[in-house]
Amino acid sequence: MTDNTTEPRRSFGIDVGGSGIKGGIVDLDTGELIGERFKVLTPRPATPEAVAQGVADVVAHFDWPGQVGITLPAVVSGGVARTAANIDHGWIGTDVYELFGRHLGDRALSVLNDADAAGMAESRYGHASNEVDGVVIFLTLGTGIGSAILYHGQLLPNTELGHLEVRGKEAEHRASSKVKEDNGWSYDKWAEKLSEVLRTYEALFSPALFIAGGGISRKSHKWIPLLTNDTPVVPATLLNTAGIVGAAMAVDAGLRV
């Protein structure tokens, strides 16, 4: 009897965050992790060398010999970190491929912004978004507003829509979930502010869909029905694995930003 089963297409992703460095093996056919993810604490201070060693420790935990995708809470362009959010400012100007190459050896690498990676993963594997014909805008609603813009799965890297001004104030200072918490707003009040931001994005990009991520997306049933913008908004479905999955996708596609 012939065994027609095939091994899943595998890749490896690591998501560097302000508190933890998380990684795992990803089944690229399903967007699911193969086995459990592994996490080490983000070092203090989160300097480039210290974080790169943490990334190497995660890879070594799995004894993974192949390609590795890595997200950073930073804008990455031309292989250089241009900003630094929740990590040491020493990252600014760092050649990320030289850095991680020294710690991970001769293997294929892809390093990209964390919101971009999560957006890629949600666009391909999210329950409500992978059949969308048009522009998809993924937003992480947390301390700030992270963003990723995709068209038919193709990423426009390093968008910073949270810094776009809406009536004289940055969008993330007007409608992030932190602003809601800091002001003690009800969901109704916050939805009013967020709708204003989303309408601004609609006017500029004419999206077919918004995907809302971040911790507050877990309570999306309490606020998505209150939004008054025109474009449909759906909650993210991959939650805390999106960055890992997107990083694994990026390196498999040979993405270098």
Image (cartoon, rainbow, N blue to C red):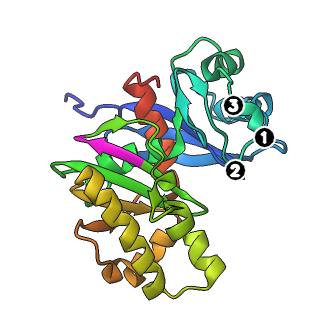
**According to the image, label 3 marks what residue?**
92
Residue under the image location 33 percent in, 52 percent down: 137
Looking at the image, how many numbered discs can be counted on the residues?
3
Query: What span is in magenta?
Result: 148-152
The reply to whether discs 3 and 1 touch (Cβ–Cβ < 8 Å) is: no
Q: Is residue 237 magenta?
A: no
Callout 2 amino acid: Gly
In the picture provided, is 104 more to the left or to the right than 243?
Answer: right
**According to the image, label 2 marks what residue?**
18
Task: Identify the secondary structure beneath mark 3.
Answer: loop
Task: Identify the secondary structure beneath mark 1.
Answer: loop
In the image, residue 154 lies at what x, y percent?
29, 35
In the image, residue 153 lies at what x, y percent?
27, 40
Q: Is residue 149 magenta?
A: yes
In the image, residue 149 lies at what x, y percent?
35, 45
In the image, residue 218 lies at what x, y percent?
47, 72
Callout 3 amino acid: Ile
Does residue 163 sit above or below 222 in this rendering? above
**According to the image, label 1 marks what residue?**
46
Q: Earlier in the sequence, mark 3 or mark 1?
A: 1
In the picture provided, is 81 more to the left or to the right than 51?
Answer: left
Does residue 244 sit above or below 78 in this rendering? below
Does residue 51 sit above or below 169 in this rendering? above
